[in-house]
Image: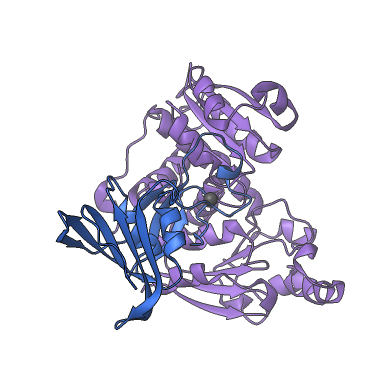
Amino acid sequence: MTLDDLSRHQILELLHKAAYIDAHRREVSHTCDGRVLATLFYEPSTRTRLSFETAMLRLGGKVIGFAGAQLASVTKGESIADTIKTVSNYVDAIAIRHPKEGAALVASRAASVPVINAGDGGHMHPTQTLADLATLQSRFGRITDLTVGLCGDLTFGRTVHSLIETLCRFGNVRFVLISPDELKTPQYVIDRINATPSCSYVEVRDLVSVIGDLDVLYMTRVQKERFFNEDDYLRLRDTYILDEAKLSLAQPHMAVLHPLPRVNEIAVEVDDDPRAAYFEQVKNGMLMRMALESSVIGDELPGYVPLEPKEVQA
Amino acid sequence: MEVTSIQDGIIIDHVPAGTALKVLQYLKIDPSKTRLALIMNTDSPRYGTKDIIKIENVEGIDLDVLGLVARQATVDIVRGGRIVEKVQPHLPEHVVNVITCVNPRCVTTTERGIDQMFHLAHSERQEYRCDYCDEEAKL
Ligand SMILES: [Zn+2]
């Protein structure tokens, strides 16, 4: 599945389920009894795999799969489609991670069970975006009417593009795009904001000058290999590091997000600040994967009352 | 220039000058096995110069593909030596196995036995993107 395949109502329903799961962990712990999830990781991404697997285990289901090194012996050079057709016979749902862009679509067309995209190259990583949305929802009780700053590498950061595009579907967001000229937001993402009348954006170079306006600050890694020379990198790097000094200029309710792992773009001293939300984001990622896995398999969470359609704005 | 008129087949007119061979390639017509006439870089009142392709005895040409490679072209259907129908190609919504994705990170470069599939992402800009990786097509 991609996020575009999910209606706005379905996304809100998943957010609602994640909150319910968090508050009713014991009640939901047998939701997927007897179910099996396959995690097929064609490239190592231990953090994401652990999140998918823990989510299934916490729902009472079981997990099979392979990752990285075991790949060669499992697939023996087989096509993705053939592996998926085989594994479809064993399990109730598949989570796939693959370095090639579009691999998840190949998998979902070949599969006879639901397929969740756990990242296909630099293309899409929908469950990261769901984790980001869940973090906004839990911090603010909404994913609209926010001023969202995105800081760092806005050119190559796919999670940033996906978050902007998804927030545009719900509307009423002011984006503050904070990056060096070398790493500005690509035109197709700007087009998406422009095509949304209730959303707006500004592009700035300096984090300090805007941090006081933000409800959300989404930090990303600024990678050295994106720069032509070392001097540019060193000059710019510090501008995009968040520390307590910069954070002291921010509003008390601001939330700091980061897709993790970080390198040095958020100083460790920030971790203890109540505004740091990036480890919560990890928890929300697992909760959203629990909501998603139980939903695609079709197992109802005990005691859960679905969102009324009328609660969703048109 | 003297060109034998065709009895039954199609005439593709207003092909952009110099692109007739590319158009044949996209239409999957093998010039060594097909009876056809090419007129290249001839005068066109409308576009200055143009190419014309006349093909005898054709069946099942995918004219959608023409919309892709020669948007301004027109197609005359000829039967018994007379033009019986004129067709204007339109931009197809989906294109299967006509364009190849150029993105080296795309799954179509490694996965065996899958179709090259593109969709019309932006009709004004005539922009096609790969179904798999969303890379823009290079025509
Ligand atoms: Zn592609």
Residue B57 vs B76, above or below: the answer is: above
Give the chain coloured blue.
Answer: B
Location of residue A239 (image quadrant):
bottom right
Residue A183 vs A1, above or below: the answer is: below
Instruction: Give the colour scheme shown.
Output: by chain
A22 on left or right of B27: right
* x and y, in percent, of residue A197 in the image: 36, 74
- Image quadrant for the N terminus of chain A? top left
User: Which residue does the image show at 57% across and 52% down from the upper left?
Assistant: A123
Give the chain coloured purple.
Answer: A
B16 on left or right of A97: left
* x and y, in percent, of residue B129 in the image: 46, 57
- Image quadrant for the C terminus of chain A? bottom left
Res B65 visible? no
Residue A165 vs A114, above or below: the answer is: below
* x and y, in percent, of residue A248 in the image: 70, 73
Depth order, front residue of A250/A47 = A47
Depth order, front residue of A144/B115 = B115
Depth order, front residue of A76/A259 = A76
B31 on left or right of A75: left
* x and y, in percent, of residue A49 in the image: 64, 35
Q: Residue furthest right?
A: A230
Residue A214 vs B6, above or below: the answer is: below
Depth order, front residue of A124/A19 = A124
Res B114 visible? yes
User: Which residue does the image show at 62% across and 46% down from the upper left?
Assistant: A282
- Badge count: 0
